[in-house]
Image: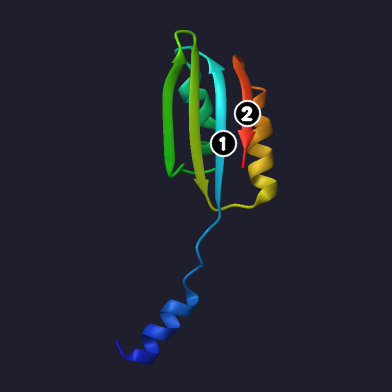
Amino acid sequence: MSASSLAVVEATLPATLPLYTFHISAQADPGMLPRLVHEYAKRDLVPVRFHAHFAAIDRLEVEIVMEGGDDDLAALIANKLRVIPFVLEVRQR
């Protein structure tokens, strides 16, 4: 591949995609994590990071990072996460 061909390939690659981070506080429930992931899966999205831990014996803290999309999609997902049963709070940045 010549240098000019490489330049064309590099020029067509997308710039770094935006990252959207969702911080979710939820009651500890066996079905909570699949319900959260479902909001991404039904849009054919795979989070680049998914971290969950117990903040208390009855409360989960979850961080989900999504790459790509736009502000409207991120706001839509945040709103969908907020209405999941047992979700206490969703913060998105």
Image point (39%, 91%), residue name = 4
Q: Quadrant of residue 79?
A: top right
Q: Residue at x 46, y 23 (%)?
A: 33
Looking at the image, tell me whether mark 2 or mark 1 is earlier in sequence order.
1
Judging by the rendered image, the residue that carries numbered circle 2 is 90
Question: Which of the 4 image quarters holds residue 81?
Answer: top right
Q: Position of residue 24 (x, y in %)?
A: 56, 27
Q: Residues within 10 Å of mark 1 (few under 14, many from 20)?
A: many
* Vertical order, 4 against 80 (above or below): below
In three-dimensional space, the C-alpha distance between marks 2 and 1, rounded to whole angstroms, equals 7 Å
Secondary-structure class at tag 1: strand
Q: Amino acid at mark 1?
A: Phe
Q: Residue furthest left?
A: 1
Label pair 2/1, CB-CB below 8 angstroms: yes
Q: Residue at x 62, y 28 (%)?
A: 90
Vertical arrangement, residue 58 with respect to residue 53, above or below:
above
